[in-house]
Image (cartoon, rainbow, N blue to C red):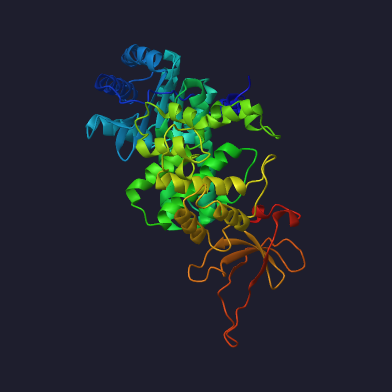
């Protein structure tokens, strides 16, 4: 039976070998063994600066390093060492903390732009020697960088060692706010997809793999939520599951920030919403993407995805109580009506999960899928309002409607000037007058230049508004993809 693994297998071929480490607490004995491996590797690396590569001392160092590495790789399927903030980490646990040896090993790699070192099961002595050879020729006078080192590893057919470059953060990226947010969104969706691919094989999801993405989303949203909100309005059916998870995560975090919730809880909300539908990776694609009405048996499989999601998160030390609650109960309804998984008791939904449920519904309604009626953003909100008190908490629906505004971000509007625009940002004091980007002029021509109007602007002399919204526009009325103009 086909599943998500078949759809995403090509991504596995594009990635270097990445071992799947145990996600529970790391045993102290394991950490000590990793520290011993690092000490042996450091000796191999530094030895080549003293002796030529063929010197017996170097060969002996490589042999001894392999004697420690090989059994470890056989048991754990691999080893990944990460370099962050002057420290070495294994499974996000500190190694050789504040030691000279650790700092020396850290600098040896990071000064060459390498911030992650991975050894996969099957490593050979020749491959380790090749790594040392490459680094020897990236000596102190001419330090080759990450991309060059990676290319040299490929040229020497090193299949069980991979290097990772520095993880780009929001502060280090160049370009406009939109490009930064777009890059973060795309990378987050890909990392979620990659982690999901690994989880299919292991029946376990490594929550730690997506935690950094959540952190960056929070920083970006707290700085300016409108940019990522506009990105999330671009709907992708081809990669619906993962883009939907990203969208619900962004909406829910925006909602929490709008309500001025305690920042300490944002990470848990982000993790829970990013993974709220992760159990769907266990659903066969012919059911998940079925364009016609599902039969009862297929519906039972679909309705089981919260249970599968919780099972996949078990034994992950980064999955706390709230993410579990979000994953398991996001399809519960107000006072337990018509929700699933079915509970024998009538349980009131957690208020935070109620927030997530509304965001989940809104994103699903505003996405065009074969079996789903597409709603305009404003129409989706009106539809959700009708379900207040039945499916959703009325107060939460009211707050959500206020946050989204009269014209939610991503809405297409026609101005009284005849121009077609897309809503980019709200004006908190004047919800009828958002910031908009022109995508089509009054003659129907696509506008390639960046023209943004603040609809609160007035004529200095007449004190009249320069432009106003005349009507909402159906996306199907535009002969091109309007979101490409973002």
Q: Residue at x 68, y 32 (%)?
A: 290
The front one of 118 and 379 is 379
Query: Is 253 on the left-hand or right-hand side of 2?
Result: left
Q: Is residue 32 left or right of residue 71?
A: left
The quarter of the image holding the C terminus is: bottom right
Residue 183: image x %, image y %? 53, 46
Residue that protrudes farthest toward the left in the picture: 99
- Relative height, residue 47 to residue 368 (above, below): above
Residue 142 in view, yes or no: no
Please determine whether, in this image, residue 122 is positioned above or below residue 114.
Answer: above
In the rendered image, the quadrant that contains the N terminus is top right
Query: Compared with residue 199, is residue 259 higher up or lower down, i.e. above or below?
Result: below
On the image, the x and y values in percent for residue 355 come to 46, 49
Judge by depth and name the residue closer to the eye, 290 or 267: 290
Q: Looking at the image, which residue is at 44% across and 14% down?
A: 124
Residue 472 lies in what quarter of the image? bottom right
From the viewer's side, name the closer residue of 271 and 151.
271
Residue 484 percent coordinates (x, y): 66, 52
Report the residue at 40% width, 13% height from top: 74
* Residue at the (55%, 26%) spot, across then down: 282
Q: Compared with residue 137, is residue 275 higher up or lower down, i.e. above or below?
A: below
């Amino acid at each position: 039976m086909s599943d998500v693994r078949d759809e995403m297998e090509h991504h596995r071929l594009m990635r270097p070998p990445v071992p799947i480490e145990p996600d529970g607490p790391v045993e102290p004995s394991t950490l000590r063994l990793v520290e011993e491996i690092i000490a042996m590797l450091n000796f191999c690396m530094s030895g080549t600066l003293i002796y030529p590569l063929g010197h017996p001392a170097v060969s002996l160092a490589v042999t001894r390093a392999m004697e420690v590495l090989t059994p470890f790789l056989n048991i754990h399927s691999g080893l990944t060492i990460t370099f962050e903030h002057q420290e070495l980490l294994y499974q996000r646990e500190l190694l050789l903390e504040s030691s000279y040896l650790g700092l020396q090993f850290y600098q040896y790699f990071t000064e060459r732009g390498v911030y992650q070192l991975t050894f996969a099961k099957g490593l050979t002595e020749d491959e380790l020697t090749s790594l040392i050879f490459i680094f020897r020729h990236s000596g102190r006078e001419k330090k080759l960088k990450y991309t060059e080192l990676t290319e040299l590893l490929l040229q020497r057919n090193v299949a069980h060692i991979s290097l990772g470059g520095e993880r780009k953060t929001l502060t280090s990226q160049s370009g406009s706010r939109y490009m930064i947010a777009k890059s973060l969104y795309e990378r987050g969706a890909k990392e979620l997809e990659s982690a999901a691919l690994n989880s299919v094989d292991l029946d376990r999801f490594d929550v730690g793999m997506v935690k950094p993405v959540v952190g960056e989303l929070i920083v970006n949203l707290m700085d300016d939520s409108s940019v990522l909100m506009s990105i999330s309005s671009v709907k992708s059916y081809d990669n619906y599951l993962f883009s939907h998870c990203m969208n619900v995560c962004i909406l829910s975090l925006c909602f929490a920030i709008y309500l001025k919730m305690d920042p300490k809880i944002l990470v848990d909300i982000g993790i829970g919403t990013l993974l709220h539908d992760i159990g769907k990776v266990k659903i066969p694609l012919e059911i998940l993407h079925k364009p016609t009405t599902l039969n009862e048996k297929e519906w039972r499989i679909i309705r089981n995805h919260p249970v599968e999601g919780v099972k996949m998160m078990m034994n992950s030390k980064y999955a706390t109580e709230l993410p579990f609650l979000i994953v398991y109960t996001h399809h519960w309804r107000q006072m337990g009506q018509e929700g699933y998984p079915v509970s024998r008791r009538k349980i009131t939904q957690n208020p935070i999960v109620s927030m997530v449920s509304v965001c989940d519904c809104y994103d699903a309604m505003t996405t065009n899928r074969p079996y789903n009626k597409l709603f305009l953003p404003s129409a989706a909100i009106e539809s959700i309002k009708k379900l207040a008190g039945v499916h959703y908490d009325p107060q939460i629906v009211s707050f959500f409607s206020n946050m989204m505004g009269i014209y939610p971000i991503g809405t297409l509007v026609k101005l009284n000037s005849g121009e077609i625009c897309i809503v980019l940002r709200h004006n908190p004091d004047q919800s009828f007058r958002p910031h908009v980007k022109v995508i089509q002029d009054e003659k129907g021509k696509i506008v390639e230049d960046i023209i943004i109007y603040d609809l609160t602007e007035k004529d200095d002399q007449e004190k009249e508004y320069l432009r106003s919204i005349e009507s909402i526009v159906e996306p199907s009325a535009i002969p091109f993809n309007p979101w490409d103009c973002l």
